[in-house]
Amino acid sequence: MSFFKKLKEKFTTQTDSVTEKFKEGLAKTRDSFVGQMNELFAQYRSVDEEFFEELEEILIGADVGVSTVLELIDELKDEVKLRNIKDSTEIAPVISEKLAEKLDKSGEDTELNIQKDGMTVILFVGVNGVGKTTTIGKVAHFFKEQDKTVVMAAGDTFRAGAIEQLEVWGERVGVDVVKQQAGSDPAAVMYDAIQSARAKQADILLCDTAGRLQNKVNLMKELEKVKRVISRELPEAPHEVLLVLDATTGQNALSQAKTFQETTDVSGIVLTKLDGTARGGIVLAIRNELDIPVKLVGLGEGIEDLQQFDAEQFVYGLFKELVEEDTGAGEEDEESR
Amino acid sequence: MAFEGLAERLQATFDKMKGRGKVSEADVKEMMREVRLALLEADVNFKVVKKFVNDVKERAVGQEVMKSLTPGQQVIKVVNEELTKLMGEEQSKIALAQKPPTVVMMVGLQGAGKTTTTGKLANFLRKKNNRKPLMAAADIYRPAAIDQLETLGKQLSMPVFSLGDQVNPVDIATGAVNQAKEEHHDYVLIDTAGRLHVDEDLMGELQRIKEAVQPDEILLVVDAMTGQDAVNVAESFNEQLDLTGIVLTKLDGDTRGGAALSVKAVTGTPIKFAGMGEKIDQLEPFHPERMASRILGMGDVLSLIEKAQTNVDEERAKELEKKMRTAELTFDDFLEQLEQVRNMGPLDELLAMIPGANKKALKNVQVDESQIGRVEAIVRSMTSHEKQQPSVINASRKRRIAKGSGTSIQDVNRLLKQFEDMKKMMKQMTNMQGKKKGKGGFQLPFM
Ligand SMILES: Nc1nc2c(ncn2[C@@H]2O[C@H](COP(=O)(O)OP(=O)(O)OP(=O)(O)O)[C@@H](O)[C@H]2O)c(=O)[nH]1
Ligand SMILES: Nc1nc2c(ncn2[C@@H]2O[C@H](COP(=O)(O)OP(=O)(O)OP(=O)(O)O)[C@@H](O)[C@H]2O)c(=O)[nH]1
Ligand SMILES: [Mg+2]
Ligand SMILES: [Mg+2]
């Protein structure tokens, strides 16, 4: 259990507000998950088919995803045979261990790739309505707070009111928005934006794009072009391509990640709307099946509702109570229902 | 696609059962496991799945196998029937108040598609029912939400009622209804801000709007890609507002859309419309039986046929035909045709919809989407003059086009040749058939 011991130490010593906020945001996921697990252990004394079926449902109910869950269950069944486990309490640590294995990708880089010298360009991509524009507003604020010069590019020229929406964020945060008329070529907007950001000696350029479903070949091509133009104007750019995923999304999130990865070489994921869902298990599936780190999470509609993602923190939040039983810790931390 | 359809999943079980006359309990159990997984993969909520599987199990065990069906098909049939039953009747009708205006309220989570659907519905009511709706901008929170609705209003040349973002949404809704009465609008469509079902303050606001304007319809707008949480969202909105219907959006994506089943099961309210794209006219009546086979991942013949029909715009087809006869066909027409094929969805998906097109057999059929992409890139790299008059494309133009599209000169040459051949063929064909065949479609070089 070294993984969880390590985690536990880390978080019992860490008491800043960041952790608090993060915990709050994840409270729903954790409460429902942990509650269900405890119920499972109470209900099933012996480890049998029904027990596994129930466990499967808990995990699937958290949007972990069928294939990841089935894989996990198979591994668990093997362990049970191997270790000759009969009693359901004995299997609890094995479950944590296996989950941790799936989540632990140590060395994974969740920091944003910010250039020390010169401009950093971040391109935001994703399907419709997931929170791209809002996240850009929050990220702009985040950098503005660090006294960086930020420029935003209104690359969604398609959706009604998209440019105006970004402009409102621009005013809110106090940063410039480069835009063209609705309906114009998004690649041309990016070209403009890079020139203009350069002239302003901006540190950060945040590029908004129109939402697009990953099965729309034409729109994915358009996105490729947008990215190509950016790279042409500024080699090495974009320095980050962030795929924005809505945490309420089910299994389609995986398909989104795969396709956007193929077309735009996604460097990180922003998981939004985690404040609303009791799920978020899709993080597990993404970590298990794809090699893209979650870098940021959205926890609300406000300008401050953005957190850098800490995978360990997430796991810990998710399995906290189980872990504590597991490592024999006390219940100093009463959960409010 | 990442998901296997149910039919494919069941193949192994079917093989074992071949030649037996009755569906045994063990067979059913095994198959039900597959049914269960297929539904879970499609994002149907696990509780809904559990109940469903139990119901079907009861019906399936001991059934005499019909002569025309294998035992496996028999089970699929039962599953499909039950699922369709659960999805409910086709109900794309929208309420009509005895005394106008009919008030419709759009509610849902953030980003589900409420504002877009408000515009689509206004368009739908005008086009299909000859109505004169007034849209109301009652989202005062999201940046530029009012602009968004007003832009849609402008696109449609339809009025939008707004009092800015400093006025209480309840007053905006009331004001809209009053104005509708004065100006004799027969519908008022109220766009509300996205909110979480667990946000007590904002849910309270919706209740107050409801109380103030007594809507005839409260439509929950649900993103078809929603996962397991769809049940909680729908249940909660329904408890607090008594929904009258559901609109499922973004069904033009490749999601299985199991959320549809979940929300229907927990609310019991009909799914009335399906959002099939971002454009204002992409709202369709909801077809329960199609949704059932989509969730199960089974071939959907009806959809295929209808898609093919609606996507080839009759008038354009006639125009094209004329052009073909006179060999005036340009690359602009070509692009348009390409687009129409595209609109029908990814080609391999289309092929999968063909009845009897078993996935295994299809694996050998290479639908080379990248080839299509290449062709398209070439055409898009032409100037409009070149598109209209391909004969001007000389060597240096070819070089430029190849460079611009990231292809080779050979690729460009090949396409130009195919295009010429096509024109010739078209001419012959249309000459032969005369005016009889108004179907419009022609063979694309990559098919
Ligand atoms: N609760 C919650 N809402 C969010 C979050 N992030 C974004 N939203 C809301 O989700 C809705 C859609 O957000 P947008 O930023 O417009 O999404 P988008 O991806 O830019 O949408 P398109 O450009 O239309 O594809 C808005 O109502 C946002 O306020 C979040 O972390 N939590
Ligand atoms: N592909 C596709 N996109 C859709 C559909 N319906 C809506 N959208 C897109 O989804 C995104 C969000 O739509 P909105 O209408 O702004 O959603 P909303 O529910 O009003 O969002 P909030 O007001 O922020 O809660 C936009 O990019 C729309 O263009 C649909 O049926 N298909
Ligand atoms: Mg946007
Ligand atoms: Mg809206």
Image: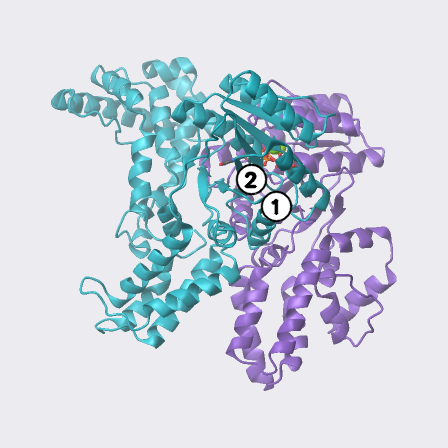
Chain colours: A purple, B cyan
Give the amino acid type for the residue marked by disc 1 in the picture.
Asp
Q: Which residue is painted at 63% across and 36% down in the image?
A: B211
For disc 2, does the CB lie below 8 Å from ligand 1? yes
Q: Which residue is mark 2?
A: A127
Q: Is residue B249 left or right of residue B72?
A: right
Q: State the residue in front, B307 or A268.
A: B307
Q: Amino acid at mark 2?
A: Val
Using the image as rendered, state which of residue B430 and residue B428 is in the foreground: B430
Q: Earlier in the sequence, mark 1 or mark 2?
A: 2
Q: Where residue A244 appears, x then y in whole percent?
A: 62, 42
- In this figure, which residue is indicated by the disc labeled 1? A246
As helix, strand or loop, the secondary structure at mark 1 comes to strand
Q: Quadrant of the C terminus of chain A?
A: bottom right
**In what quadrant of the picture does the N terminus of chain A appear?**
bottom right
Few, some or many residues within 10 Å of mark 1 (<14, 14–19, 20+): many
The quarter of the image that holds ligand 1 is: top right
Q: Is residue A320 left or right of residue B269?
A: right
User: Residue at horizontal 39%, vertical 33%?
Assistant: B343
Indicate left or right for A115 with B435 as reference. right
Q: Quadrant of residue B203?
A: top right
Q: Is residue A299 visible?
A: no
Kindly identify which numbered label has been placed on residue A234. none
Q: What secondary structure is marked by label 2?
A: loop
Residue found farthest to the left: B432
Circle 1/circle 2 CB separation < 8 Å: yes
**x then y, percent, for residue B213:** 61, 31
Q: Quadrant of residue A245?
A: top right
Q: Is mark 1 within 8 Å of ligand 1?
A: yes
Determine the residue positioned at 87% across, 62% down. Answer: A13
